[in-house]
Image (cartoon, rainbow, N blue to C red):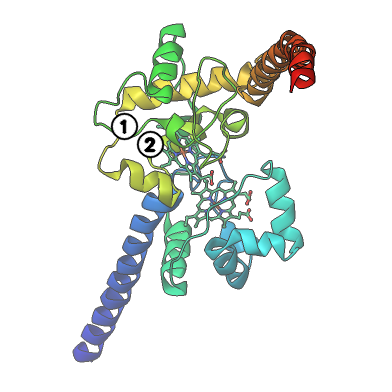
Amino acid sequence: MNKNLMKYILLIVGIFSFANGRADEGKQLFDRTCAACHTIGKGRLVGPDLSGISQKRTKEWLVSFIKSSTSVIKSGDTDAVAIFKEYNSLMMPDVDYSEAQIVSILNYISSDRSSGGQQQAVTADILSGTTLENVKVGLLLFSGRHPFSNGGPACAGCHKVKDERIFSSGTLAKDLTESYNIMGSAGMAAVIKSPPFPVMNTAYTQHSLSEEEVINLTAYLKTVSEERYYQRPTDFSTTFAFFGLVVFATIFLSTVLLYYKRKKFPVNREILDRPSKVIN
Ligand code: HEC
Ligand code: HEC
């Protein structure tokens, strides 16, 4: 009788620690790749609050959506398309996790009950108390005129924004002009702090940004987003076209001038040549 009881206790303890182990792996993966955009019970961030998601969707749907939301959306799945539209067509990056890893993330999401009812914790605006100074420093950091304290690459190396004060920028990654409008300050700061995009993440793993740098950049990108209707585009192709025209006109005019100047020469020459021909 006692032996049996022991067995049951061991079994229960075993199941608990097993479940905990899975949830732990899930928590690590979630914190690393999902927390920049999702909370569990703390409200909407870049993407929807994921608490109770297992009741809302089937496990198969969740696994394939998390693995590659882009292909599920492309396949025309109605739920996926609806949520994608609801979130302003913001792409959730694909991950190359195994099904087991994704299930462990889902287990963690359903096991996490620590966070209900604290919406304020995340939605409190990190930009409250920032001034124009933050925006200015943010611009300098973004464009690379101020180096980052840990030496990471300038954002403008990969991203473009509509801001005529930034003269050269990369086009490797998305134009960030409207990103703030879509993500809000919490989402923007979360994405900058721990980028869920492999290319960007690699660029900053050895060069993490300070809390203050994240705030300055967020403040700057907010201003960019708010002023996007008033800025002339940073696209310099029109300027180049204009210079091209000026250069063309100059060359054309000087050719014409030279032509008229020179035209006399062959005419004179012809006249000059005539008598010599006669003599010959
Ligand atoms: C860059 C931000 C971002 C990251 C990182 C991200 N997501 Fe998302 N997620 C979104 C957005 C935005 C949506 C809304 C649908 C869409 O736009 O594709 C979404 C939707 C979802 C949905 C569907 C919710 C619903 O109501 O149907 C699930 C589930 C989900 N994400 C889980 C995850 C998990 C798990 C991870 C980590 C492996 C993750 N997401 C990482 C932005 C993100
Ligand atoms: C090495 C290139 C690289 C650098 C440097 C870089 N990023 Fe990114 N970033 C990316 C890539 C790639 C994405 C994924 C979206 C895409 O495909 O364009 C991205 C996405 C983002 C997004 C999400 C955009 C959206 O609307 O979905 C934000 C915000 C962002 N980066 C901000 C920054 C900031 C701020 C910096 C400077 C601290 C920075 N990035 C530096 C490559 C880079």
- Residue 129 visible in the displayed image: no
Circle on res. 209: 1
On-image quarter of the N terminus: bottom left
Left or right, 247 with respect to 52, comes to right
The alpha-carbon separation of the residues under discs 1 and 2 comes to 7 Å
Expressed as whole percent of the image width and height from the top left, the position of residue 268 reads 76, 10
Crowdedness of circle 2 by 10 Å Cα count: few (<14), some, many (20+)? Answer: some
Circle on res. 193: 2
Relative to 230, does residue 188 appear above or below in the rendering?
below
Q: Nearer the viewer, residue 254 or 194?
A: 254
Q: Is mark 1 within 8 Å of ligand 2?
A: yes
Left or right, 82 with respect to 104, comes to right
Q: Are marks 1 and 2 in contact (CB under 8 Å)?
A: yes
- Identify which residue is drawn at 58% across, 68% down: 64
Expressed as whole percent of the image width and height from the top left, the position of residue 91 reads 60, 49
Left or right, 200 with respect to 159, comes to left
Three-letter code, disc 1: Leu
Left or right, 166 with respect to 233, comes to left
Mark nearer the N terminus (1 vs 2): 2
Q: Secondary structure at mark 2?
A: helix
Q: Is mark 2 within 8 Å of ligand 2?
A: no
Place residue 204 in its image quadrant.
top left
Q: Nearer the viewer, residue 170 or 63?
A: 170
Expressed as whole percent of the image width and height from the top left, the position of residue 95 reads 47, 61
